[in-house]
Image (spheres, coloured by chain):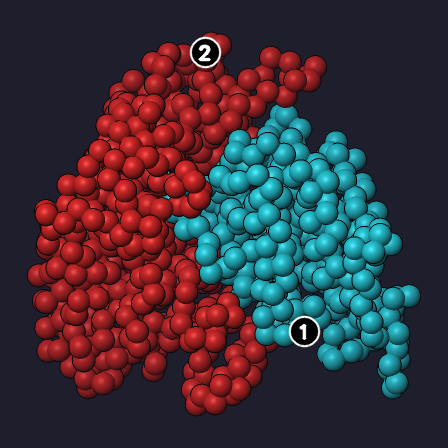
Amino acid sequence: MTAATPVHQHTDQHYLAMDLLRFTTAGSVDDGKSTLIGRLLYDSKAIFEDQLEAIERATEQRGEDHLNLSLLTDGLRAEREQGITIDVAYRYFATPRRKFIVADTPGHIQYTRNMVTGASTANLAIILIDARKGVIEQTCRHSFIASLLRIPHVVVCVNKMDLVEFSEARFNEIVAAYSEFASRLEIPDIKFIPISALHGDNVVDRSPRTPWYQGSPLLYTLETVYIGSDVNHIDARFPVQTVIRPNNDEHHDFRGFAGRVAGGVFKPGDEIVSQPSGLTSRIKSIHGPAGDLEEAFAPMSVVMTLEDEIDVSRGDTITKANNPPNVTQDIEAMICWFSDKKLVPNGKYIIRHTTREAKSVIKGVRYKVNINTLHKLEGDTEIGMNDIGRIQLRTAVPLIADAYQRNRNTGSFILIDEFTNATVAAGMIL
Amino acid sequence: MSSYNLTHLAQLEHEAIFIMREVAAQFERPALLFSGGKDSIVMVRLAQKAFAPAKIPFPLVHIDTGHNFEETITFRDWLAKDTGSRLVVRYVADSIKAGRAQEEKGPNPSRNGLQTITLLDTIEEFRYDACLGGARRDEEKARAKERFFSHRDEFGQWDPKNQRPELWNLFNGRKNPGEHFRVFPLSNWTEMDVWQYIAREKLDIPSIYFTHQREVVNRNGVLLSKSPYITLLEGEKYETRTVRYRTVGDSTCTGAVESDAADLAAIIQEVASARQTERGTRADDKRSETAMEDRKKAGYF
């Protein structure tokens, strides 16, 4: 590998103005995912000499020929022993434009669980396709999960272009096949890039070997994809985490509601409605980490004070009168199951939704999804590890919720086994 | 950038504050593990911001190996006082005296591993149910797999193969009696982010992070400071070099780097062009390929 221009030497001003892109990488075994991530890290100087030396040592000990970049991310003893990735690994790199958080999700074991986890916080998913194999079952599975989790941007990298002689016709064939499949999904933004991760074509720099390709190389795409509209700035939602009462002389009457804005914009003077009580007041002040704020929006952590002393506590959500949320005990949702203990019909689970925790009962399983074909299996209601299905849920107290499609913060939940305390499912409200 | 965008450093700050408030809300007896190092100094500032105008609602806990740099200890005491926090210090030496831990043998016996025993005893003594730590995923490969909310069983052990998945902003802190959590609000921060934040917030840090003259011995490429706890091997000698510390741990296992960085701007330049990871100076990580994972499984920070 040859390093590209050093991109780590940015000035302070650059650094302080950079924004953040979280992305996830999905691929099958041997599709070059580790090589691609290794190249992005290496070319952005996020791999250090001592790390490289450690990998070289480990590669040599294993008697392998090529530098095994997967050893960078496969940090656990069991992973290195078995040569597999067990768990999502997070990697970090920065260019002068952006800082990146990569959720690197394993391609085989517990695939769905890990990809769903990585996808839950991602703005963008990279889906790798082997140019020789084209769109295969696993491509469909990865894309379905990206769509289900509402990752706003998908970049399809057609990899190993060197092995198909950088053929434009082959690339177009794959683009057509993928586009046809993706028309059944809901992915707002899809881009296609012909690459060779091994040789670096169209990863950092434009490749002279694909003169027919008019688009940007991958890194530039990651640096410039517009993420400003990925967050809901319309429906005002402020789930209260905790109440701050200093109890000292200086701030004797201070009663502030701490939380993270989950949607919309709040300003001092705004009329608010606290849910589920329906009590109303007006925002007196908003305090952020850097001082008092004129406005607060997602995903800011702030403290709000209100003009009136109304009863608001953890689990309640402060909203505005327009665009009210659903306040309901009956939920329809898609879930992904994480536990080797199967879903128990009519079983009781703890639900955690925004800052609220409550008991809930599964009222029914409507169908299971074959995640390779997207077929709904109406008769099959047995939900086990890595299965995705649609359920009806009844909660002991009302949730203050939106459809996941509308807001990822107020539309998502997890289910917890009340005996083992394990997180057994992730849910997306319909 | 539209007005509704946040810089990455602001996003990390909001995320860390959210995690800290989640800890205060979900647990009864949290504590903040404080070492006097740069990451824990950032943690204290974030905790101040998370609960202002109230005080930090949990104590600062330091597990003192007795091999710390003096500058760090002085700084620790000053910061606790300055922020009006309660400081709890427990000593590895006491664990050794009580027969619960045994001093290592050899030319630089490290108390690094012994800290785990004292730490777990301290957690039991005060019945802490969540310990906030400043560890970051970019530091070390086992830490790259760590959760924000990391479950520990009744023996304080970490089970990396069986971790709870963490999705969205939903953190599951439920546990059985006797178990506890380690919580890492800086998970997504890098070394660069920490330094930039220190500069942005104008935070005070111990003097050993800046360049100074020090007597050191070069042992296996790690520059160890002269101290009563180190025995020179044959052929080794102390020499005076111009150094600073990139990370602050025990003087017996933390190496200095040659540097003339005298202020934060110079440190940031140095970090930007560094070709070694910060833990490259930590002899404790070099003991084996999975040294960190093995210590973490046993209950280490």
Tell me: residue B50, above or below residue A13: above
Front one among A279 and B26: B26
Which percent across, then down, holds residue A341? 33, 50
Q: Callout 2: few (<14), some (14-19), or many (20+) C-alpha neighbours within 10 Å?
A: few
State which quadrant residue A268 falls in.
top left
Residue located 46% across and 56% down the image: B162
Query: Marks 1 and 2, how far apart in space?
Result: 58 Å
Tell us which disc is closer to us: 1 or 2.
1
The three-letter amino acid code for the residue at tag 1 is: Arg
Which percent across, then down, holds residue B144? 51, 61
Q: Is residue A190 left or right of residue A104?
A: left
Numbered circle sitting on residue B287:
1
Front one among B139 and B160: B160
Q: Which residue is mark 2?
A: A310
**Chain that bears disc 2:** A
Q: Is residue B154 left or right of residue A122?
A: right
Front one among B108 and A286: B108
- What is the letter of the cyan chain? B
Front one among B101 and A352: B101
Tell me: residue A23, above or below residue B90: below
Which percent across, then down, holds residue A31? 29, 75
Numbered circle sitting on residue A73:
none
- What is the letter of the red chain? A
State which quadrant residue B3 falls in.
top left
Q: Quadrant of the C terminus of chain A?
A: top left
Q: Are marks 1 and 2 on the same chain?
A: no
SS at circle 2: loop
The three-letter amino acid code for the residue at tag 2 is: Ile
Residue located 31% across and 77% down the image: A30
Q: Is residue A265 left or right of residue A189?
A: right
Residue that sits furthest to the top in the current view: A308
SS at circle 1: helix
